[in-house]
Image (spheres, rainbow, N blue to C red):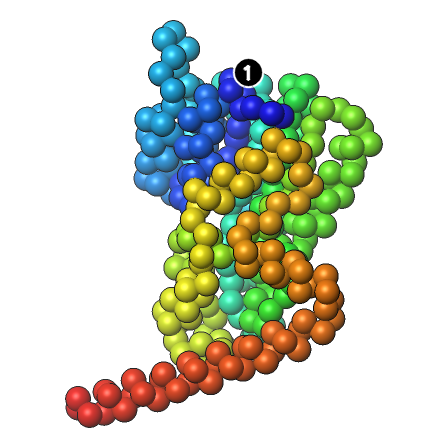
Amino acid sequence: MKHFTDKVAAITGAGSGMGRSLAIRLAREGCHLALADRNPASLADTAQLAQAAAPHVVGAPLRITTRVLDVADRAAMFEWAAATALEHERVNLVFNNAGVALSSTIDGMEYADLEWIVGINFWGVVHGTKAFLPYLKSSGEGHIVNTSSVFGLFSQPGMSGYNATKFAVRGFTESLRQELDLMKCGVSATCVHPGGIRTNIAQASRIAQNMVGFMVENEQQGKDDFEKFFITSADDAARVILDGVRKNRRRVLIGRDARAADWLARTLPAAYQALVVMQTRRLKRVAEKRARRAAQLDGKRA
């Protein structure tokens, strides 16, 4: 797929971050949009921004539809796919982009939290792929873009649930791409591995209480520290993703941190874990020192 003009793209997690940036960039190229998100207000904002970004074409305005839904809800996803195909008459692109983050030790993890992140990060991708694939095949030219993560390339402590879902998306999408290659049905697939992207995923993440005192000072500080590693803008990420679709890439790495992590995991496939532990210990000592300093200042003020 070399261009997106007059194509139809469905995007989950379109209310903010990479989903919003993808919608705006696609709209600029004259691509019709079916946008989905759990937040109705942010979803409406994205639709307005995309409509404003669209080129003005007399008699053929850009068609943008929206749907408030939870990607973990299989029935809702299939109903949305059918409605999108009916409203737009076809579907060419699907961006399974919605995702959440969870920080917890394994022994202290609640099953409800694990089921929550698996439902969105993994099952959301599966539902989006299976629901839209028949319509992509019938369009004669389609592409599925599934968002994994840099943590689908290597693991780190305190993120087992997140790592598990992102590794799963990677395996699922790589297998899907091979099947589509064998089918020669006009549909392809790309797995995206973003590094730190400046979105609201950190502030919206869940940090379990068992992480406090183990790897973070407190819940908010943990979110703020996580956010410091976000070095790439959502717009830059969207640009790289769409370029990957045009070039039919199997894997798209976003950001120098993702490229470094990929190199590390391939060069030291087992030994990298010890390096991660060493770095985590160093960061933990820095956080503890900062906490002691804050406590001393509070004591002086008192």
89 above or below 271?
A: above
Answer with the quarter of the image where residue 180 lies.
top right
239 above or below 113?
A: above
Q: Say left or right for 276 vs 197.
A: right
Q: Residue at x 63, y 76 (%)?
A: 275
Residue at image mark 1: 89
Answer with the quarter of the image where residue 287 lies.
bottom left
Q: Secondary structure at mark 1?
A: loop
Percent across and percent down for residue 1 are 62, 25
Answer with the quarter of the image where residue 184 lies.
top right
The quarter of the image holding the C terminus is: bottom left
Q: Nearer the viewer, residue 31 or 248?
A: 248
Type of the residue with mark 1: Glu
Q: Residue at x 43, y 26 (%)?
A: 27
Q: Residue at x 55, y 35 (%)?
A: 242
Other-residue count near label 1 (Cα within 10 Å), few / some / many at <14 / 14–19 / ≥20:
few
- On the question of residue 204 being in view, the answer is yes
Percent across and percent down for residue 74 are 59, 40
Q: Say left or right for 269 vs 275.
A: right
Percent across and percent down for residue 289 are 39, 87
Instruction: Report the label total.
Output: 1
257 above or below 144?
A: below
Outermost residue to the top: 59
Q: Residue at x 82, y 32 (%)?
A: 182
Q: Say left or right for 292 vs 11.
A: left
Percent across and percent down for residue 119 are 58, 51
- On the question of residue 128 being in view, the answer is no
Outermost residue to the left: 301
